[in-house]
Image: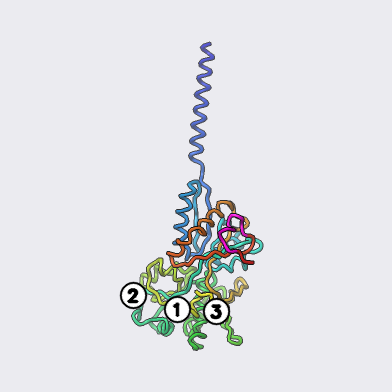
Amino acid sequence: MEKKIIAVGLLLIGIALCGCMEQEKAGSEEKIVLKIFHAGSLSVPFEEYEKMYEKEHPNIDIQREPAGSVACVRKITDLGKKADILASADYSLIPQMMMPDYADWYVMFARNEIVLVYTDKSKYKDEINSENWYKILERPDVKFGFSNPNDDPCGYRSQMVMQLAEIYYNNSTIYDNLVLKYIPNIKVEENDGSYLIIVPKDLEVNSDKLVVRSKETDLLAPLEAGAFDYLFIYKSVAEQHKLKYVELPKEINLGYYDYADYYKRVALEITAKNKTIVAKPIVYGLTVPKNATYKKEAIDFVKIILEHPEVLEKNGQPAMAIGKGNIPEELKGLVKIES
């Protein structure tokens, strides 16, 4: 009888120990890691969305990788990396570079425009305005920057803005004096009032005049440190970082649907990818790639973005919600679907 009691006691102790071990194991389970590749200009609002999402989903850890949008897409299409969400500063990169092999839908969720930012250290800061900005940039003692058009939509949009300026101001020397003079291996072809900017893989940049980095947010610190005077960047980034800026005319800043026909007179060819991009109003796009590891969780994150447009609005990126392609059922009530 005594042996039976001891045996039962040992059994109960064993069960209790197993229970403790199981609880300890459950408590130490690794979180789901949700990976997001996104445009650098989305860093501020996406940081806020990350906090909102992780508060509602404590078992999930968001890992964001900001970069130029083209570089973000190439990580998936060229390097074979997996992301649960891809968010680009140019929605057209998704249908052009990801569909149909890597994506079958996308949502256009915000818009933006290009401005010219500066600091209190910038030369001629008290003189520059929306009409004379290009004349200020042409001055020999002024240094300015933009991101690499091979890597980043803000970079190729900056080129488009400067070329559109030639049309708007009826001055055929603006792009030549600002870009071609200092990056001689970029070429421009004109055909009946339309322009094609041809960008080679490796830019031959005169660094005495121009500062070029992979993505636009890489240029903020040197600008604020006084390394150069002016920077082409998104209005949202300027507002998020409380920078002063020159607002460019609607006809050239790529921020307005009403001027879509005007914008499309300029296009840019990225020779490294054999891609030609026509200037258009700036619209951000996102998708959940086909090979995403956690599709359900990724769609839940997209829902938070669509359900909380105020996050984008307060960061200078007016929200929108237009879906194209095979939109997931969970999102159909949150977007306007277009064919």
Left or right position of 273 against 18: right
- Three-letter code for the amino acid on which mark 3 is drawn: Tyr
Q: Nearer the viewer, mark 2 or mark 3?
A: 3
Q: Position of residue 45 (x, y in %)?
A: 45, 61
The stretch in magenta equals: 327-336
In front of the other: 69 or 47: 47
Which mark is on residue 275? Answer: none
| Cα distance between the residues tagged 2 and 3 | 32 Å
Q: Are marks 1 and 2 in contact (CB under 8 Å)?
A: no
| Cα distance between the residues tagged 1 and 2 | 21 Å
Q: Residues within 10 Å of mark 3 (few under 14, many from 20)?
A: many
Q: Residues within 10 Å of mark 2 (few under 14, many from 20)?
A: some
- Three-letter code for the amino acid on which mark 2 is drawn: Lys
In the picture shown, does residue 1 fall above or below 150? Answer: above
Which callout, 1 or 3, points at the residue further toward the start of the chain?
1
Give the quarter of the image for residue 125.
bottom left
Q: Position of residue 74 (x, y in %)?
A: 58, 64
Q: Residue at x 58, y 78 (%)?
A: 267
| Cα distance between the residues tagged 1 and 3 | 14 Å
Q: Are marks 2 and 3 in contact (CB under 8 Å)?
A: no
Q: Quick check: can you spot residue 71?
A: no
Please name the predominant secondary structure of the magenta segment in the image. helix
Residue at which label 3 appears = 263
In the picture shown, does residue 166 fall above or below 309? Answer: below
**Looking at the image, what colour scheme do you see?**
rainbow
Q: Residue at x 48, y 39 (%)?
A: 27
Identify the element where label 3 is drawn: helix
Residue at which label 2 appears = 121
Q: Position of residue 58 (x, y in %)?
A: 48, 47
Q: Quick check: can you spot residue 131?
A: yes
Residue at which label 1 appears = 248
